[in-house]
Every structure is written in C-alpha cells, then in structure tokens.
Image (spheres, grey):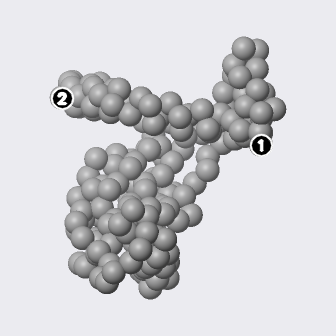
Amino acid sequence: MGRGWRGRGGWQQADLPPADDAAAWFAGRLPDGWFTGAPELTVDREEITVVGTLPDLEGEFDDASRAAAEAGRIARWREETRDERIEIARQAEHRYGRKVAWGAVQGGTRELFTHLAVPVMTRLRQPERQVLDTLVAAGVARSRADALAWAVRLVGEHADTWLGELREAMAKVDDLRSQGPDLT
C-alpha cells in the first residue's frame, strides 16, 4: 500500500482511495460469460464484495435436488475461476485499497466466499450488555460478539427500506460535498 492511505491512528475514511467507479471497473474487467448480468457490488471501508448470478440450471429438479445442484454449480464455478478471481482481486485491492470478496447466486442459492469478519470496537452500557448476555444465556448466540452480529443482521433485515433511504441520502450529501470548494 505505497500510496500513504494510512493516517495516524489507523484507517480513516478520507484516507481511502475512492471506489465510486468500482462497478464500472469490475464490469470492464470481469470476463464475459461469468455472470448473466452485471454483478452486485457492495463497498465499505474494508472490503468490496462482488456477487454475480450464474446461468440457470437446465433440467428438472425437485426442491431438494435443485438446492444441491445449485450448490454444486456454485462450487464448480468457484473452483474453475479461482486463479482468475485472485488476479482480479489483486488488481482491485491495489486500485481501491480494500480486500475483495466473491460470491455467486444460482437460483435460490447464494454463497459468499472468503469474506472478511472485521472486529468492531464498541462501548456498551449495562442495559445493552444485558441484552447481549440474555441472547447468549438463551442459546441464541455463543458469545456477545455473535449476539451483536445477530442483532445487527436482525435490524438490517427489518429496517432494509429505511437503511436504503439513509444510504441514498448520504450519497446525495457526498455528491454535494464533491461539488463544493476545494479546501486544500
């Protein structure tokens, strides 16, 4: 990472190279025929996740057989594309300063490969810790970390529309900032 993206005290959002063009870069860089359309890209401070839809299965399957066939097709695609995905990820990591994770969708089956689990430091007061401890005691989670991840997933599922609107609003703010005067 020779471009000096690390500031004092670790990663800072402003220190990261922009990834605004990541979807276009991946669209241009990915081999034709890998996916049935443009892949879904998710970008945050640490990682770019690329998830593409594989062509539909041919043949008749019952529900259980279909799920197994879809998982098998994803596993085959993962193995057949491994070397090329590693090279593309290496280039993207150099360009964007983030790790790249891959995934595939086949019918009703979605799998992510080697995506990051990033530690997040947080301070919780006793009532919040008690919620986590209750989830652990009830067997919903193995640890406070698992309980917190479970709670975040639950909020994400139930607040998806609101979170989407919030992300759109933040993108508009970023656009307005970029149009403002350069203060450097």
| Residue 155 numbered mark, or none | none
For the question of whether residue 79 can be seen, the reply is yes
Residue at 53%, 38% in the rendered image:
153
> Dot 2, crowdedness within 10 Å: few (<14), some or many (≥20)?
few
Q: Amino acid at mark 1?
A: Arg
**Disc 1 to disc 2, C-alpha distance:** 47 Å
For the question of whether residue 102 can be seen, the reply is no
The relative height of residue 129 versus residue 111 in the rendered view (above or below) is above
Residue at 41%, 74% in the rendered image:
62
Dot 1 or dot 2: first in sequence order is 1
Q: Secondary structure at mark 1?
A: loop
Q: Is residue 10 left or right of residue 145?
A: left
Q: Position of residue 176 (x, y in %)?
A: 21, 26
Residue at 53%, 34% in the rendered image:
154
The relative height of residue 131 versus residue 70 in the rendered view (above or below) is above
> Dot 1, crowdedness within 10 Å: few (<14), some or many (≥20)?
few
**Dot in front, 1 or 2:** 1
Q: Position of residue 82 (x, y in %)?
A: 48, 79
Front residue of 27 and 80: 80
Q: Amino acid at mark 2?
A: Gln
Asked which quadrant contains residue 14, the reply is top left
Front residue of 19 and 138: 138
Q: Position of residue 89 (x, y in %)?
A: 44, 68
Q: Position of residue 125 (x, y in %)?
A: 72, 15
Q: Label 1 belongs to which residue?
A: 142
Q: Is residue 170 left or right of residue 99?
A: left
Q: Label 2 belongs to which residue?
A: 179
Q: Quadrant of the C terminus?
A: top left
Asked which quadrant contains residue 162, the reply is top left
